[in-house]
């Protein structure tokens, strides 16, 4: 593994000691562990010899951009560097930063310790200490026994706050160390910034939303204009959390002194900081971010047929780095397949990205036209397993050859079998499902509840009449209504003394007509309990069928299902055939179930935790709109990309918060913030800091609710904790006085811990 060091620059007369400082950086970066990418953002020709003289270094590349007529944008230059970086992790290294070889070794070791190749949501800042002129001379003229001892000497001087050495610190600095995939996905720097000023804080704000180390400050959006770490106020203090810990491990850069630079139009401090607050609030409210950046190392060009104002667009951004050069356009801009084909040919598009192609008739026509012309495409939608999604270049659901036996029937190794067995065990015993279900109650409880006795159970889960698979892949049943007719026929002909038919409506479908002669489970009854209870499962083509195979239950399909193959689920041709299958022995081939599941888990399905917003369709039925997907693994085109999970928060009792006064001082700051704002409520999670979305939500101009871990006031009859919360809300002064008095003997009422 290597790390790409990105150096953005434009060499001019005003760039102090440009050649000397650049050469020093290159000499100090270990070639075996780092690659160097210089982004030449419009250096005039008369200074080009400085860069030409560097081309002999094997670990260095120079990207030249003809941007000399534009204001120098260090943010844009960094973005370009990430787009062309060949390594999975990047480090931003400005020309005035100084670190010796040992310091870069420490940075490399930190990246390895965090496994940042496979944990993409993790990041840190290399703290930067701005040296005085004397401090710069001292650093560059030092003659220590080793680089390690030199770094210890400098670290001590910084720690002891020698004013003649360091002018000021920046713990949450622009020297970010970040995963390339993640950076491309969030879009890099906002294109709204002009010149220099505040652009790094916007990036840090968004990066930190995926990895929150603690509660955000009560006045988070406030620019305190101070980088000190003794007061937990404003966003600068919050971003410092991403550099304090690595500084304590001896990792830092020194910013070498230089005369004040005067570049017309470059410094846009006032304008950009005003813009920063608006961008931060937009992101917190609506997840507004710049468009994802193209990955220049993937030469394909992909057209995404998607509305960039939609929540789906925001949710899929961590898929985009896989698809090279990115073009985003609404499908409605193409009146028919001919107009789409013209655009593809004119703009040299290599691939089309579709959301569910059966989502509407217009999209389906475009999809079928693209397939007919053998144009490469990719289809994205939710899978049948919890947290599963698929990127399929063969088709959609039943119409895809990705599920054909030749794709998945292969001998598994013992390790592969163990992997699948472990997944199936966890799936069967988990409460996690695609749709909301109540807590599990066991199949034994249901057997008593429904008075099953010794009878067998046929479980029938219904689907929504408007779903894609019940509309386009309805097969022999024809429709949900047709399938209900099957169930009614079977109910009339199955001996009631031998069988019980238990039906369950889809959680979002409240108005489906009921079938006579069957039992109905409550809408929120846990689907796993019902499957576990069943002897056989009859359905159209629901994902419940795939989960039922994990329980090794015989599954009979009345419609076209992608998992209906010999040894797995069995297709029925009509209601009479379905009845015969119910009455006869039907076996599930465990070996084939393991093979199919291994294929799904390692070749077809990607996985990511998602959040949804509930809304109403135009016909009044309930509907869920995707809000966010935090992918942890992506399977695409025989590649597996591990993204990892969003790191957990850190306890307020951790040394990370000592400089801010620890838990007690930080809670006092929240209390003081409440006193200054009218009607503020503090709602505190007394267990852990786990939610990376902790922030203040302003409910009105004069009233706000400080949400820590998004835990809201409990409206139920209060117990001991509830009474304390009420006291906290109504009389915060008395609450905190009592809490401080009792802190030594009772530390469990008001705390953050892991």
Image (spheres, rainbow, N blue to C red):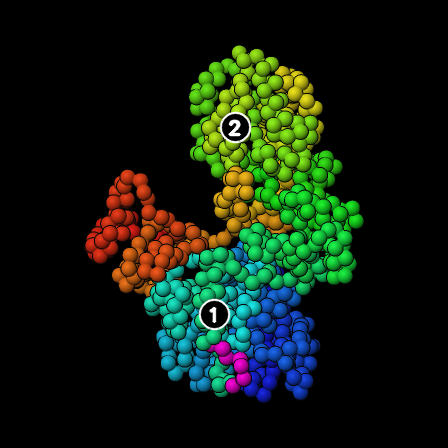
**Local secondary structure at mark 2:** strand
Determine which of the numbered discs, if any, sits on residue 50 in the image. none
Q: Quadrant of residue 601?
A: top right
Residue at x 41%, y 79% (from the top left corner): 166
In the foreground, 692 or 37 = 692
Residue at x 57%, y 51% (from the top left corner): 312
Residue found farthest to the right: 373
Q: Which residue is mark 1?
A: 275
Sort mark 2 into few (<14), some (14-19) or many (20+) by Cα contacts within 10 Å.
some
In the foreground, 486 or 339 = 339
Above-or-below relation of 567 to 205: above
Q: Which residue is mark 2?
A: 504
Residue at x 61%, y 27% (from the top left corner): 481
Left or right: residue 740 versus residue 555 is: left
Left or right: residue 403 versus residue 677 is: right
Q: Residue 226, image x and y in percent? A: 38, 73
């Amino acid at each position: 593994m290597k790390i790409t060091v990105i150096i953005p620059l434009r060499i001019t007369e005003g760039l102090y000691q440009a050649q000397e400082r650049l050469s020093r950086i290159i000499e100090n970066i270990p070639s075996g562990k780092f690659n160097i990418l210089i982004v030449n953002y419009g250096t005039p020709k008369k200074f080009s010899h400085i860069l030409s003289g560097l081309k002999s270094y094997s670990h260095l590349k120079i990207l030249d951009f003809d941007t000399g007529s534009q204001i120098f944008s260090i943010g844009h230059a960094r973005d370009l560097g990430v787009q062309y970086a060949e390594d999975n992790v990047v480090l931003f290294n400005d020309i005035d930063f100084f670190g010796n070889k040992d310091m870069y070794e420490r940075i490399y070791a930190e990246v390895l310790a965090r496994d940042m190749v496979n944990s993409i949501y993790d990041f840190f800042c290399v703290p930067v200490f701005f040296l005085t002129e004397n401090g710069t001379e001292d650093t560059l003229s030092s003659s220590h026994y080793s680089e390690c001892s030199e770094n210890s000497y400098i670290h001590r001087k910084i720690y002891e706050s020698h004013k003649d050495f360091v002018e000021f610190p920046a713990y949450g600095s622009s020297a970010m160390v970040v995963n390339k995939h993640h950076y491309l996905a969030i879009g890099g720097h906002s294109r709204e910034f002009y010149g220099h000023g505040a652009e790094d804080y916007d990036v840090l704000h968004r990066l930190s939303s995926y990895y929150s180390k603690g509660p955000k400050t009560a006045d988070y959006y406030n620019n305190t204009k101070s980088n000190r770490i003794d007061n937990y106020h404003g966003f600068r203090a919050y971003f410092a959390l991403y550099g304090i810990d690595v500084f304590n491990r001896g990792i830092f850069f020194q910013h070498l002194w230089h005369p004040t630079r005067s570049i017309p139009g470059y410094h846009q401090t006032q304008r950009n900081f005003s813009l920063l607050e608006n961008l931060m609030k937009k992101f917190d409210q609506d997840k507004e971010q710049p468009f994802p950046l193209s990955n220049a190392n993937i030469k394909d060009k992909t057209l995404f047929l998607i509305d960039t104002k939609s929540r789906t667009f925001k949710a899929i951004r961590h898929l985009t780095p896989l698809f090279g050069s990115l073009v985003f356009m609404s499908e409605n801009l193409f009146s028919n397949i001919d107009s789409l084909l013209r655009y593809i040919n004119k703009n040299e598009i290599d691939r089309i990205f579709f959301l569910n192609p059966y989502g509407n008739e217009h999209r389906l026509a475009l999809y079928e036209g693209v397939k007919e012309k053998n144009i490469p495409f990719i289809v994205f939608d939710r899978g049948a397993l919890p947290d599963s999604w698929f990127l399929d270049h063969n088709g959609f659901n039943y119409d895809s050859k990705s599920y054909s036996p030749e794709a998945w029937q292969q001998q598994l190794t013992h390790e592969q079998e163990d992997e699948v067995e472990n997944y199936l065990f966890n799936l069967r015993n988990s409460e996690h499902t695609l749709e909301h279900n109540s807590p599990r109650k066991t199949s034994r409880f249901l057997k008593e509840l429904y008075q099953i006795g010794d009878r067998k159970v046929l479980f029938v889960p219904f689907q929504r009449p408007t779903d894609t698979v019940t509309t386009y892949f309805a097969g022999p049943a024809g429709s949900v209504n047709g399938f209900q007719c099957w169930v009614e026929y079977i109910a009339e002909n199955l001996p009631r003394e031998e069988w019980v038919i238990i039906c369950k409506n889809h959680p979002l479908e409240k108005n489906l007509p009921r079938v006579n002669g069957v039992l109905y489970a409550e809408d929120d009854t846990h689907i796993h309990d019902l499957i576990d209870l069943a002897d056989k499962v009859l359905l159209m083509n629901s994902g419940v069928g795939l989960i039922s195979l994990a329980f090794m239950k015989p599954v009979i399909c009345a419609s076209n299902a992608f998992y209906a193959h010999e040894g797995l689920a069995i297709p029925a041709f009509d209601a009479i055939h379905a009845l015969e299958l119910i009455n006869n022995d039907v076996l599930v081939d465990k070996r084939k179930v393991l093979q199919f599941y291994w294929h799904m888990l390692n070749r077809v399905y990607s996985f990511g935790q998602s959040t949804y917003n509930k809304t109403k369709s135009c016909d009044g039925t309930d509907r869920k709109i995707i809000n966010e997907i935090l992918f942890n693994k992506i399977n695409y085109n025989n590649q597996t990309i591990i993204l990892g999970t969003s790191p957990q928060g850190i306890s307020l009792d951790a040394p990370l918060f000592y400089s801010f006064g620890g838990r007690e001082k930080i809670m006092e700051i929240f209390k003081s913030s409440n006193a200054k704002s009218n009607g503020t409520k503090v709602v505190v999670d007394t267990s852990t800091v786990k939610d990376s979305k902790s922030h203040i939500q302003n409910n009105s101009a004069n009233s706000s609710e400080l949400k820590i871990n998004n835990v809201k006031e409990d409206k139920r009859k209060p117990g001991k904790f509830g009474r304390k919360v009420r006291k906290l809300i109504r009389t915060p002064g008395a609450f905190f006085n009592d809490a401080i008095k009792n802190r030594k003997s009772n530390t469990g009422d008001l705390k953050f811990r892991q």
